[in-house]
Structures are given as C-alpha cells and as structure tokens.
Image (cartoon, rainbow, N blue to C red):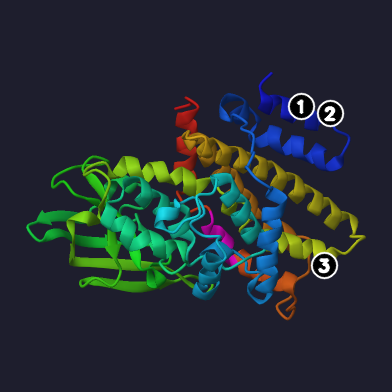
C-alpha cells in the first residue's frame, strides 16, 4: 500500500474527531491525487532542530512589537530584515564565500516556518532570500554574485520578479518585453505589471524576450535589472485594502552590462519554471492567515463553545495535513529532485485553506465595525486580502492544469 494511502487509512480508523475530519477532507479533495503522485519524503533536518526553533523564538521575542502581521510575507520592514541578516537567518543555504552560512535547506524551512507562524514582517527580503539568491548562485555571473549575494545575506538588498505583463499574466509565455544586444550591452524595453515589492527592491529578476521574432517559451532569457537604472519608471498599484504591494514597471531602453544576463541565452523559460517549485510549496502557501487562527484560539479561551471548538479542530486538521505535504515537498527539493506537481498541489490546497479561513471565522464570530480587538482587526484585513492569495505564483486554473498534466489526466 502506498505511504499516502496508508496515512489516510490510519486517519479513517482513528477515533479522534480531529483526525476523523482530516480523513474526510483528504479523501474528498486529494486522496486519489496523493496516491498517484505525492511521494512522502521524510523531513529530517540535520543538527538540533529544537535548539534552532528556540533561537528563532528568542529573536522574535526581542522584536515582539513587529509581530502578528497578517499576510506577513508581503509586508516589508527593512529594519526587521537587516536584524534577521545580522542574526544569521538570511542566506542560510548560501556558501560562506558569498556571505551565507552553508546550512541545510530544511534548517532554513524551520526558520521561515517560525517567522511566518509569528506573523513577522519579512516581505522586504522574501523574494531575494527564497529564490533570487539561489538562482544567482546557480546561474549568475561572477560579477552578479559579487554584486548581490553578500547584500542579500545581510538583509540589505531586496529583489522583485518581473514576470507578468499586460496580455501576459497567466499566459507567461506571451511576454513581449525585449532585450536587444548592442556593442554597449543589453537594452531592455517594455513593461511589467503586478510586480510585488518593486517600489522597495534594489534589483529585478526579469524574464524577457532576447531573440527577435521568437514565440512562446522559446527565445526568452533572464536578466538582473537594477531598479535605479536610467529609463525605469515605477508606478504603484494600490489594492482594495489601500495597501501598496503591487506595481507597474516600465523600461525605456534600459542599458545593462553583459553580465546582467542570468544563465544561458534563450533558456530563461526553463530557469524561471524551475524556481517556481521554491515559490509554490513553502509554508507561506498555508500560513498567510495563520495569525487569525491563533487569535481565534486565544479569544476562544480554555472552554470554547461547541461550534468554535469544532472549527478549531477542523482548521487544525487541515493545517496539519498541508504542513506534512509542504514538509515532504521541501525534503524532495533538498534531495535535488523537481517536485513540480507536488509543489503545485501544496499551493492549490494551501491557497484554498488560507482563503477560506477568514470566511469560516466570520461565519461564527460576530464582528461589527466598531470592534477593534486583534481577532476583529485580523479578520477584516484578511477578508480583503485573501482573494489575491490564489493569484500569487500562478492562478488556480494554471496550477490545476499543471497538476492534471503531471498526473496524465490531460
């Protein structure tokens, strides 16, 4: 019997009501998929994990005033990021020669799980530490490594990802921003949209068309573009909650040196899609609403009413399952494998969970506009933010297409 099926059957046989809900949720939404595709990898970080968690919690206790932020991984605080860098919690998996700490990827997972569970404002450095730095280390020129990696490890250099464009959002292969090679270097022209954090970033990792006349995913390359370069215009996009996370970015014949290209010319599509597994499977895919869940538990007290108790049990069961799936995917990535389907499953199920959480709390908790405690504040903020969760890292329709193809269903 596959490990995933055995896991499900154990929950079915359990008399624990939380596990009973867990087995129902798994079987209703993902059991067949898990049995066909989701290989359970053991999450086994080296060293003393309990001690590492304690170190992170001690750090968070020193910065208590900044915690409890909903959707915290898009909320940037440069001061907090610099403090994390000084504490050795950024650039953890990078080699020491570039300012990193040469630690295991699963140790890094432990750290970011603790940060997200506490609602720490990690958005400034998030993309740089999660995916840009590993990509530069693997594909970047020596000049790029020297220019950016030490600053990323210190929490002083932040990056954004230039993917979506008008007319090329979910259909990423339709990008039209161009890179033209000249005797002076590369000239970038075009536009990116919905670029998270562009207004506070020092550099963009952009996917652009480097071969004139190429179509779809052929002829694309990745470039590192300094955000203070001549010819760049950044315009904010304010969301419905009044927050500024997204931006439009315009490139008007921006000049880049030859070393700004990342990896091999024309291989940008393969490089960009490879890093998406890092973006789609982490704990940020099910912990964006976590501070609301902990606030609900705190507000309910030691003897919650039956409906609230039932909701807490359901949420705990679902969170536990998602965490096991994410841990397993992280372990597969650490083993050097490409868990594209598993990462997509974590993202889709995680988005559904974190989007539904504020609605499920709202259905049971009376929250008039005059109520200003933590539970009410977090619920209002997440009801506004949650619809966007399934857009980040690929829309639900695209993600489910990837899963279907991976399972041979289409």
Q: Earlier in the sequence, mark 3 or mark 2?
A: 2
- In the image: residue 380, left or right of residue 304: left
Whether residue 322 is visible to the viewer of this picture, yes or no, is yes
Separation of marks 3 and 2 at Cα, in angstroms: 32 Å
Separation of marks 1 and 2 at Cα, in angstroms: 6 Å
Q: Is residue 330 above or below residue 262?
A: above
Residue found at the very far top of the displayed protein: 1
Q: Position of residue 66 (x, y in %)?
A: 63, 74
Residue found at the very far bottom of the displayed protein: 370
Mark 3 — residue? Answer: 299
Name the residue rendered at 92%, 60% in the picture: 303
- In the image: residue 384, left or right of residue 21: left
Whether residue 165 is visible to the viewer of this picture, yes or no, is no
Q: Main secondary structure of the magenta part?
A: helix
Name the residue rendered at 32%, 46% in the picture: 139
Q: Earlier in the sequence, mark 3 or mark 1?
A: 1
Mark 1 — residue? Answer: 9
Name the residue rendered at 57%, 54% in the picture: 284
Mark 2 — residue? Answer: 13
- In front here: 163 or 226? 226
* SS class, disc 2: helix
Name the residue rendered at 45%, 37% in the picture: 401
Q: Position of residue 93 (x, y in %)?
A: 49, 50
Q: Position of residue 14 (x, y in %)?
A: 85, 32
- Residue 46 tag number: none
Q: Is residue 254 above or below residue 263?
A: below
- In front here: 35 or 272? 272
Q: Which residues are magenta?
A: 384-389
């Amino acid at each position: 019997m596959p490990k995933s099926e055995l896991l499900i059957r154990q929950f079915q046989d359990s008399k624990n009501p939380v596990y009973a809900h867990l087995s129902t949720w798994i079987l209703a939404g993902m059991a067949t998929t898990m049995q066909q595709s989701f290989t359970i990898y053991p999450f086994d970080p080296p060293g003393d994990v309990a001690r590492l968690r304690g170190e992170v919690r001690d750090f968070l206790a020193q910065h208590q005033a900044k915690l409890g932020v909903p959707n915290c991984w898009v909320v940037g605080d440069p001061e907090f990021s610099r403090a994390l860098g000084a504490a050795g919690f950024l650039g953890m998996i990078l080699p020491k020669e570039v300012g990193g700490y040469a630690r295991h990827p699963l140790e890094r997972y432990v750290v970011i799980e603790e940060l997200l569970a506490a609602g720490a404002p990690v958005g400034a450095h998030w993309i740089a530490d999660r995916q840009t730095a590993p990509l530069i280390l693997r594909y970047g020129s020596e000049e790029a490594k020297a220019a950016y990696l030490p600053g990323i490890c210190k929490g002083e250099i932040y990056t954004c990802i230039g993917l979506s464009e008008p007319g090329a959002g979910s259909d990423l292969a339709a990008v039209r921003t161009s890179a033209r090679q000249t005797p002076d270097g590369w000239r970038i022209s075009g536009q990116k949209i919905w670029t998270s954090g562009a207004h506070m970033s020092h550099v963009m990792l952009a996917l652009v068309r480097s071969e004139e006349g190429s179509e779809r995913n052929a002829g694309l390359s990745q470039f590192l573009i300094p955000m203070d370069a001549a010819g760049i215009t950044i315009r904010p996009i304010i969301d419905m909650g009044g927050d500024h996370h997204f931006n439009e970015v315009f490139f008007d014949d921006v000049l880049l040196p030859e070393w700004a290209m990342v990896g091999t010319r024309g291989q940008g599509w393969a490089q960009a899609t490879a890093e998406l597994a890092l973006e789609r499977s982490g704990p940020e895919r099910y912990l964006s609403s976590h501070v609301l869940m902990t606030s609900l538990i705190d507000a309910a007290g030691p003897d919650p009413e039956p409906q609230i108790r039932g909701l807490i049990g359901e949420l705990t069961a679902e969170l536990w399952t998602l965490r096991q799936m994410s841990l397993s995917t992280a372990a597969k990535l650490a083993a050097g494998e490409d868990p594209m389907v598993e990462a997509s499953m974590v993202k889709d199920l995680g988005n559904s969970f974190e989007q539904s959480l504020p609605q499920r709390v709202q259905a049971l908790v009376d929250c008039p506009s005059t109520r200003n405690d933590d539970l009410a504040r977090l619920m209002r903020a997440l009801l506004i933010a949650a619809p966007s969760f399934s857009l980040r890292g690929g829309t639900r329709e695209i993600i489910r297409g990837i899963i279907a193809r991976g399972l041979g269903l289409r």
